[in-house]
Image: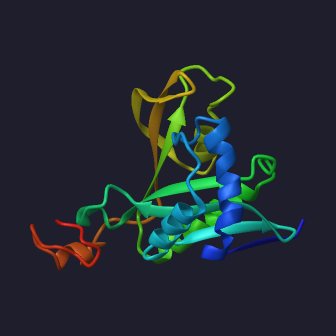
Amino acid sequence: MNVEIRAVTEEDAKQLLNIYAFYVENTAISFEYEVPSLEEFKRRISNTLKKYPYLCILADGVISGYAYAGPFVGRAAYERSAEMTIYLAHDERRRGLGRRLYEALEKALKEMGILNLYACIGYPAEEDEYLTKNSAEFHGHLGYEKVGEFHNCGYKFGRWYNMIWMEKIIGTHEGAGNPAAQTLQNGEEDEKGVYY
């Protein structure tokens, strides 16, 4: 199998949306009820790429998954943290592609100065046909630890699901500082219109 990892472009949106649609329509891995439109999905990609890496993995020339990072909470004090997201084509799981993709994303984030990684994961009290504990187990194998759980907070397919947060520390915090936060005072607005 020939594997390539590269940055996503808006031209990839249709293929990525096809991957994501399976999870919206058939699982509680995504808590969205409706598959977003192609235009909305392109907007999401574009917004992510303004600041964070958004990668896809190709197996023998076909996009087989994607992963990206986003802001964790969205305040200046969290600038050294990022939330992780990954989706693989549902028939491409358990081939090592997810690990390779996440490791590439982690490397890119570390180079940006990100220190903490977080994953928000749907988690069943009891596994069913819509949600298993596979995502939590995948993250656990990559060094993430469960740091919090919210009970019966996601409702989909007529059932309640829990949500967990998992965390991985990838850098040293001593002397890291936060240059973005140091330039803004409370009440000021950054270039994205976020107030601090």
Taking the image as shown, residue 97 lies to the left or right of residue 76, namely: right
Q: Specify the farthest residue to the right.
A: 1
Quadrant position of the N terminus in the picture: bottom right
- Residue drawn at point x = 67 percent, y = 61 percent: 16
- Residue drawn at point x = 69 percent, y = 26 percent: 129
Residue nearest the observer in this picture, 189 or 84: 189
Q: Residue 143 location, x and y as percent?
A: 56, 50
Residue nearest the observer in this picture, 34 or 67: 34
* Quarter of image, res 28: top right
Taking the image as shown, residue 110 lies to the left or right of residue 91, namely: left
Residue nearest the observer in this picture, 169 or 23: 23
Quadrant position of the C terminus in the picture: bottom left
Q: In this rendering, does residue 7 appear at all? A: no
Q: In this rendering, does residue 195 appear at all? A: yes
Q: Residue 18 location, x and y as percent?
A: 70, 55
Q: Residue 42 location, x and y as percent?
A: 55, 68
- Residue drawn at point x = 39 percent, y = 31 percent: 150
- Residue drawn at point x = 39 percent, y = 66 percent: 172
Can you say whether 69 is above or below 118 in the image? below
Q: Residue 60 location, x and y as percent?
A: 87, 68
Can you say whether 27 is above or below 61 in the image? above
Taking the image as shown, residue 171 lies to the left or right of residue 192, namely: right
* Quarter of image, res 29: top right
Taking the image as shown, residue 184 lies to the left or right of residue 43, namely: left
Total labels drawn: 0
Question: Colour mode?
Answer: rainbow
Can you say whether 124 is above or below 174 in the image? above
